[in-house]
Amino acid sequence: MKGIMKMICMAGIAASAVSCAGGGSKSQDGTDNFRYLIDEFADLKIMKYQVPGWDDLSLQQKEYVYHLSEAAKYGRDIIWVQNCRYNLPIRKVLENILENYEGDRECRDFQDFTVYAKRVFFSNGIHHHYAEDKIFPDCPQDYFRSLMEAVGDGDRCEELLPVIYDPEIFPQRKSNDPGKDIVQASAVNFYENVTRKEVEDFYHAMLDPQDDTPVSYGLNSKVVKGSDGVIREEVYRTGGLYGPALTRICSELEKAAEYAENDAQKQYIATLVEYYRTGDLKLWDKYNIEWVQDTLGTVDFVNGFVEDYNDPLGRKATWEGLVNIKDHDASQRTEILSANAQWFEDNSPVDPRFRKPQVKGISAKVINAVALAGDCYPSTPIGINLPNADWIRRDYGSKSVTIANITHAYDLAAQESPRNLLSEFAWSEEEIAREKKYSAITDEIHTDLHECLGHGSGRTLAGVSPNALGEYSSTLEETRADLFGLYYIADPKLVELGILPDMEAYKAQYANYIRNGIMVQFNRVELGKKNTEAHMQNRKLIAEWCYEHGRDGNVIEKKVRDGKTYFVVNDFEALRGLFARLLAEVQRIKSEGDYEAGKALVEKYAVDIDPDLHKEVKARYEQLGLKPYGGFVNPEIVPVKRWGKTVDYRIEYTDDYLGQMLEYGKKYATL
């Protein structure tokens, strides 16, 4: 599953460089000079993405996209408040300083302050977007105080500076420390004055074990225990929690519906609006059922409280938005996979009890993003599969997308840098050559398989709660989908279907997956810290489990050369067999709701990082000067008016990351 085009020149903020086009910027001689990489700081790189196919849309479709994009962006403040209750006041202080400070902006302390602000903007709060740990400014606290006082925020210093600087206050956005109450140890703003046990008991009382179409209790609410000792939900709805933001979102959605491509889109937008007005989760389910059945439109969107990765209990959903247009030519590949979904399900290496006897409604397409918002902005996924409710997948199907222009931007931004990750961590020239030849296509295919078929595969047994795996559910679900993709990317069926060119291609994906999961990805984790993010845990779990269980056959070999460690796949066929075994077990865990087995798997293989290997990876990666995380600025969708009437919409691209953040802080402020 995250526009400004206004020129900004205020109090030392440089004017943004804006390019305008339907699909990119051109120099005067007509050559493509679009630059994808626009900023680098800390451990982050900022890119922009192009929107192919924009000029092929009708005016009605562009109107539809425009209002859907506005609806998505108006949810920005929600994710900030959800991530920590102090995020929004801190952001407003940062914005005030950046816009109005009249002192020395060239000194080292102000530069350090600016980097801190940019990091906080990127993470939608004061905690690292991936590692979950609190971000600290490099400038001294007294200097930060002086900045606040200089712009009239001195009265907030005693409240906010401890939150910013004290390592004991809100140290982690989400805690998964088994030695703590993870609800009380987490900074996320989903719970107030309650313990983990109280939350679990609260929702357990709502469950009906006989209901095979359960609503996602708690998805859109905050759990609070009042002074009277009574535990209540504060529901996200207009007139309730986040009401001002949801009111603006509903207004833009209703405008969008006037330009919808078909009646189905108008219907599920109306359902979504009613859900926001009432907070009724049965309407959320109704919306998802209607949405998943619309496969005809070119324009599509995600809008709502969707993913529960940030909740320590895997129940509460953060706000996110994504507006996109279908790439009809590229979607031929995913449509082939969708058409063969039953074959993949029937031939899965899992226990037949856990397979779906009839796969329904699997649709997949390749899309180009037009607007990213909430938990998708600035850092965005490259593939999505929704809805998340297993019973809706079972009875109505799911939609899967691969976001082509985001993947394309990552690839081209990497080419703009002379630094090479592969040459540092791959063992041989043969390995490097194979990845250069096949990695682009196999990365896309693995994403297709993961999103299109992996998440939609399998079934849970009757009576198993959708929250049975608790805090381990996100990691295990991503593990299951990745394993599905890894197993099938080596299947001759993909060559037969014309999706892969030959039976050598999958080896590039296998080698890269093991290398990254067992070693390279830990450049993202601070030394001494554990591996906590669900997707990183999933990759480590798979790589470590396969390394251990393939040791007798030397399936994956640890090699050392010139003091550097490498992990090399020696037997690709055997590795596929290991992927099959692990997939069968993870599917069993999900299907049976085996919490203890899931916990054991994650805690043993996914969390702890070998300290010596970690130190080595960090040192080798640092020498390359690469940034481990990336995110994007949005293009701006600009109405073109003549005689007071909108006659077109054009795309404009900005090179000013900080400018877009400050503009969004004003234009889309709701809370």
Image (spheres, rainbow, N blue to C red):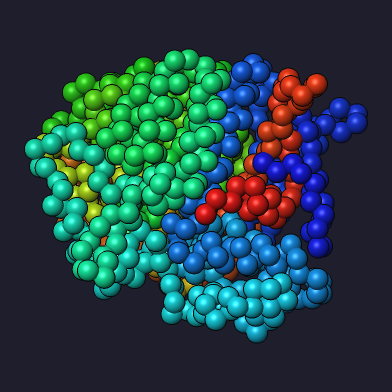
Residue 655 picture location, percent across and down: 75, 47
Up-down: is 568 above or below 648? below
Residue at 38% x, 49% y: name it.
Answer: 240
Residue 286 picture location, percent across and down: 30, 29
Q: Is residue 325 left or right of residue 14?
A: left
Quadrant in the rendering for residue 96: bottom right
- Does the image show residue 42? no
Counting the numbered discs, the total is: 0
Q: Nearer the viewer, residue 67 or 46?
A: 67
Residue 388 picture location, percent across and down: 32, 38
Q: Nearer the viewer, residue 207 or 270?
A: 270
Residue 26 picture location, percent across and down: 82, 31
Q: Residue at the bottom extreme?
A: 142
Residue at 27% x, 30% y: name it.
Answer: 392
Q: Nearer the viewer, residue 70 or 475?
A: 70
Quadrant in the rendering for residue 24: top right
Q: Is residue 362 left or right of residue 516?
A: left
- Does the image show residue 268? yes
Q: Is residue 380 left or right of residue 412?
A: left
Q: Residue at the left extreme?
A: 210
